Image (cartoon, helix red, strand yellow):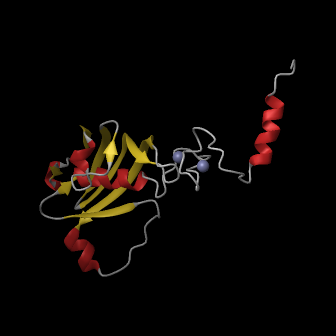
Amino acid sequence: MRVQIEEIPPEGLSIELKEGGSRFFEEEAALRFGDKIVARLRLSRVDQFVQATGRAETTATLTCARCLEEFSFPIDSEFTVEIRPAEKAESHGEVQLLPDDMDVLTYTGAGIDILELVAGQVAESLPLKPLCRESCRGLCPQCGQNSNLSECGCGPVESDTRFAKLKELLRDPDS
Ligand SMILES: [Zn+2]
Ligand SMILES: [Zn+2]
């Protein structure tokens, strides 16, 4: 989906998208989403310069880096992106200082690629090292069993004493 600069009226242009993830990430088949990607954005324009503010929401299906189980990762990304004409951005030749949290994209005569814009924001929200939960215990280094599910009895790990204490506390007081 492309928007031409002339299509953005002085009062701005609101866009709402609801598409399956594969529409946004055509080349990355490994990236899967549990929900459709819902994006709402508003484009406003001053002369040739466009600012897009919006929000993208979806749920990604990720693989935990420790236990290798799949889990759902909710994404709710609010963004502000500045979009300027490619020629101007290049010919300027000067480094412009922008707030760190503002991305700058460029557009060409073909217009602004909305899918690409939203895909970029969703991709930035993905963790580099996905964990199903902060406390994930991962796989047993000896037998490969998922330690979150059950103890495999492969021998002591450093947190054993803590669990022994916990077991004591949980013991039925009547016994
Ligand atoms: Zn995990
Ligand atoms: Zn084991």
Q: Residue furthest right?
A: 174
Picture coordinates of residue 57, whole percent (x, y): 37, 40
Image quadrant containing the C terminus: top right
**Residue 158 sits in quarter:** bottom right
In the foreground, 116 or 133 = 133
Q: Residue furthest bottom?
A: 93
Q: What residue is drawn where x is 59% and y is 41%?
A: 148
Q: Residue furthest left?
A: 110
In the foreground, 56 or 146 = 146
Picture coordinates of residue 31, whole percent (x, y): 32, 50
Q: What residue is drawn where x is 16% and y is 51%?
A: 2
Number of marks in the image?
0
Q: What residue is drawn where x is 30% and y is 50%?
A: 118
In the foreground, 13 or 55 = 55
Seen in the picture, residue 64 relative to 106 is either above or below; the reply is: above
Seen in the picture, residue 65 relative to 42 is either above or below; the reply is: below
Whether residue 10 is visible to the viewer of this picture, yes or no, is no
Q: Is residue 95 left or right of residue 144?
A: left
Whether residue 37 is visible to the viewer of this picture, yes or no, is yes
In the foreground, 154 or 157 = 154
Q: Is residue 7 left or right of residue 133?
A: left
Q: Residue furthest top?
A: 174
**Residue 12 sits in quarter:** top left
Picture coordinates of residue 145, whole percent (x, y): 54, 46
Picture coordinates of residue 156, whole percent (x, y): 72, 51
Q: What residue is drawn where x is 51% and y is 44%?
A: 132
